[in-house]
Amino acid sequence: MKKYRTIFSAFHVIYRLITTSIDIKSFLIGIAKVYKNAFKADRVVLVYKNINSYPFIKVRLDENRQDIKKGGLSILTSREREILIQEEEIVFGNRLIYPFNFFDTLGAIYIRRRKQKETFTELEKKWFLSLCEEVSIGLKIFNLYREERKIIINYIKSLTRLLDQFVPTSSLHPKSALRLIRALGKEMKLSKTEISSLEYASLLHDAGKIQLPSKILKKQKPLTEKEFKVIMKHPKKGVELIKDLDILKPIIPIILHHHERFDGKGYPSRLKKGQIPLGSRILSIIDAFDAMYFGRPYKKKKSLREIEEELRKQMGKQFDPKVVTAFLKILRRKDIRKYLRRH
Ligand SMILES: [Fe+2]
């Protein structure tokens, strides 16, 4: 009975991994762990490659070791290469292999029990095959998701290129903004879809500026009240630009409210606290960070310490304290610091 429970929960966990994994790597690590536990395997090797772009990703779990590698063919041992070119599943004795070769995917999973006599039962072999079929579906979904994402990103890129020509210095640094959004999204336990929406919104949030007079946008001196009123129109203009694209509908509220303030003194709707979409509360911090870290023609760059101080000062005023706390946490991470130093 316990065995049945373990295997049912394995199916459930794989389904959950398909719907919630943010990237292919975390999906593969999760999958390998499920196999290891469900089949009491001493070794699991999972190799994956999208033939269009990804390098090989290899997840290897031994009794007390976890080894994850990304790279060319050289990361695979000769035995693992053999496994990879299997055309059909191999289910005998204490070893089970299943190839994931379809469309643009090349991959395989291999599980093993160390002792020869601990062979897999017929039932376990059946479970193994069904589980592998579910994983295949997951990998196909990942591919589709990746294709769809590529199309949207290209559309967004052309829009932002246009914006860059128009107002070269006002927009976010997309690479670092995306890196920070992903890290912050994970830290705040956002779903994959929420993180994607935030990524698109970060690239497009100021697109509405295309429709404003460039004289005002390029002005180096402080704006007059009248000019500022014109600038305040850009969130609404941005929404007009994307409102007919179904796929971008979820980001409309994020863009519309990215200049609201937590204390209700922002624009365009003077929303406050939880009334402001979470995405907008996050984006306003990413936006402010970018302006402080990289500087603007009218604003000097700030050090990370100065930025931290400023964000703390604005907790509960301009920014949501919860988002600031999570953001400061990721800002202290070594990998993020290293990334920022390089950009
Ligand atoms: Fe803006």
Image (tube, rainbow, N blue to C red):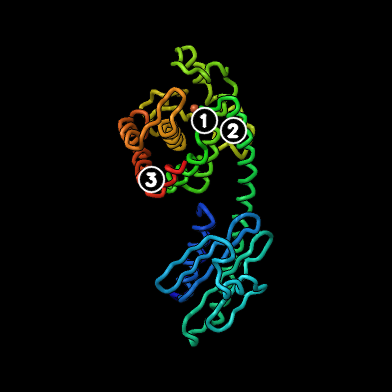
Q: Residues within 10 Å of mark 1 (few under 14, many from 20)?
A: many
Give the vertical position of 86 relative to 204 (above or below).
below
- 15 to the left or right of 285: right
**Residue receiving disc 1:** 171
Q: Residue at x 33, y 33 (%)?
A: 306
Determine which of the numbered discs, if any, sits on residue 222 in the image.
none
Residue closest to the eye, 13 or 172: 172
Q: Are marks 1 and 2 in contact (CB under 8 Å)?
A: yes
**Residue receiving disc 3:** 330
Of marks 3 and 2, which one's residue comes earlier in the chain? 2
Q: Give how far across and how far down residue 15 sits, in percent.
A: 53, 60
Q: Give how far across and how far down residue 4 sits, in percent.
A: 48, 73
- 184 to the left or right of 155: left
Q: Residue at x 63, y 40 (%)?
A: 154
Of marks 1 and 2, which one's residue comes earlier in the chain? 2
| Secondary element at tag 2 | helix
The amino acid type of the residue labelled 2 equals Thr
- 343 to the left or right of 93: left
- 152 to the left or right of 302: right
The amino acid type of the residue labelled 1 equals Ser
**Residue receiving disc 2:** 160
The amino acid type of the residue labelled 3 equals Ile
Whether residue 277 is visible = no
